[in-house]
């Protein structure tokens, strides 16, 4: 039988997510407070983020 393409998409996305190094995720997480501060100060205007 044919597989549902949405199942394939979910699997590909999960594989891609799990392939990201933990150090990259940690770095992005640690930058969140600074990024959120810039976004809030911009009041919805353009930011580099």
Image (cartoon, rainbow, N blue to C red):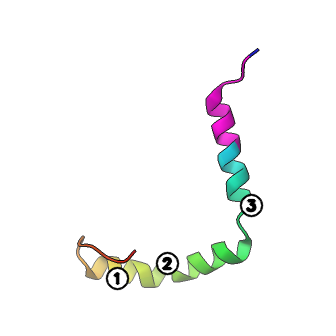
Residue pointed to by mark 1:
38
> Where on the picture, by quarter, is residue 45?
bottom left
The quadrant the C terminus occupies is: bottom left
> Where on the picture, by quarter, is residue 6?
top right
Q: Secondary structure at mark 1?
A: helix
Q: Residue at x 67, y 33 (%)?
A: 7
Cβ–Cβ under 8 Å for marks 3 and 2: no
Q: Residue at x 73, y 58 (%)?
A: 18
Residue pointed to by mark 2:
32
Which label's residue is closer to the chain start, 3 or 1? 3
Along the line of sight, the residue nearer the viewer: 32 or 2: 2
Question: Eyeballing the image, is 19 above or below 13?
Answer: below
Does 3 appear in magenta? yes
Residue 11 marker: none
Cβ–Cβ under 8 Å for marks 3 and 1: no
> Where on the picture, by quarter, is residue 21?
bottom right
Q: Residue at x 27, y 82 (%)?
A: 41
Question: Eyeballing the image, is 4 above or below 27?
Answer: above
Does 1 appear in magenta? no
Judge from the rendering whether residue 22 lies leftward or rightward of residue 29; answer left or right: right
Q: Which residues are magenta?
A: 2-11
Question: Eyeballing the image, is 40 above or below 2?
Answer: below
């Amino acid at each position: 039988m044919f597989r549902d393409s949405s199942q394939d998409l979910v699997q590909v996305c999960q594989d891609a997510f799990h392939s990201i190094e933990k150090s990259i995720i940690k770095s992005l997480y640690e930058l969140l407070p600074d990024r959120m501060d810039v976004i809030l100060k911009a009041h919805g205007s353009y930011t580099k983020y």
